[in-house]
Image (cartoon, helix red, strand yellow):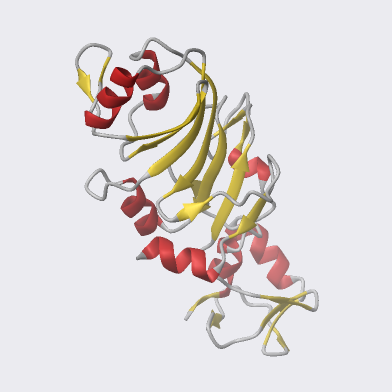
Amino acid sequence: MMRLDKCLCHLGYGTRKDVKKIIRSGVVSINGIVCKKEDTKFDEENDQLMIDGIDIIYQKFVYIMLNKPQGVISATEDGLHETVLNCIQDTTKGLFPVGRLDIDTEGLILLTNDGQLAHDLLSPKKHVDKTYYVEISEPLSKESIELIEKGITIDGDELCKPAKVKVLSDMAIELTITEGKFHQVKRMILACQSEVTYLKRISMGSLQLDEELELGQWRYLTNDELESLMQ
């Protein structure tokens, strides 16, 4: 059970002051009965909530896949740039991106309000794989690939954990890492006397970027995707 005003705030209908006005306007009903008191208790699992005659489905946690375009930052707010939250139409309170992609990096971003799942996916102890499609300025030598797969040192003294390299062509690879160091992929490639010219994250753990999502498009995770991610 939770307070009605808290429920509407969580669903993104505004501040406590905003939702108080909505409730007192008489457009909210619970089980068919108009409710004008913001402290009314609401059973989010069993009660039927309607606003302006529209069924409202309450979800404690929301899980969204976004194909992040370049120029968008992985943050909840920013005074200069568009954020990943600006790309989606879900107004659930408390959504945030799980991890970060650079402003010029495209691809998979998971947005949620589930802090425990985010912790599990980002914890260094969990060693969650993150795979990137990488285009490079110069081909990687056999020795460079071996260094990456054994654990390459970047910036002279920072050791990376062993990674996996799948060569797609002279100028493109798939790189799988288990860490999240600052600009890690770019710095790893730079340590191999090459540079990243294009970068796109294609998977995180079991979650694969939906190839049907155009840049800037998003969708909710399927039950199968969520169950696999939580295993």
Image quarter in which the C terminus is found: bottom left
Q: Position of residue 127 (x, y in %)?
A: 27, 46
**Looking at the image, residue 197 lies above or below residue 199:** above
Does the rendering let one see residue 210?
yes
* Residue at (33, 24) in percent of width and height: 145
Query: Looking at the image, how many numbered discs can be counted on the residues?
Result: 0
- From the viewer's perspective, is 47 left or right of 226? right
- From the viewer's perspective, is 153 left or right of 206? left
Seen from the viewer's position, the closer of residues 52 and 136 is 136
Q: Position of residue 164 (x, y in %)?
A: 34, 36
Seen from the viewer's position, the closer of residues 8 and 224 is 224
Seen from the viewer's position, the closer of residues 3 and 152 is 152
Q: Position of residue 53 (x, y in %)?
A: 80, 78
Q: Position of residue 220 (x, y in %)?
A: 60, 60
**Looking at the image, residue 41 lies above or below residue 97:** below
* Residue at (52, 50) in percent of width and height: 111
- From the viewer's perspective, is 124 left or right of 40? left
* Residue at (50, 64) in percent of width and height: 225
Does the rendering let one see residue 60?
no
Residue extending farthest to the right is 53
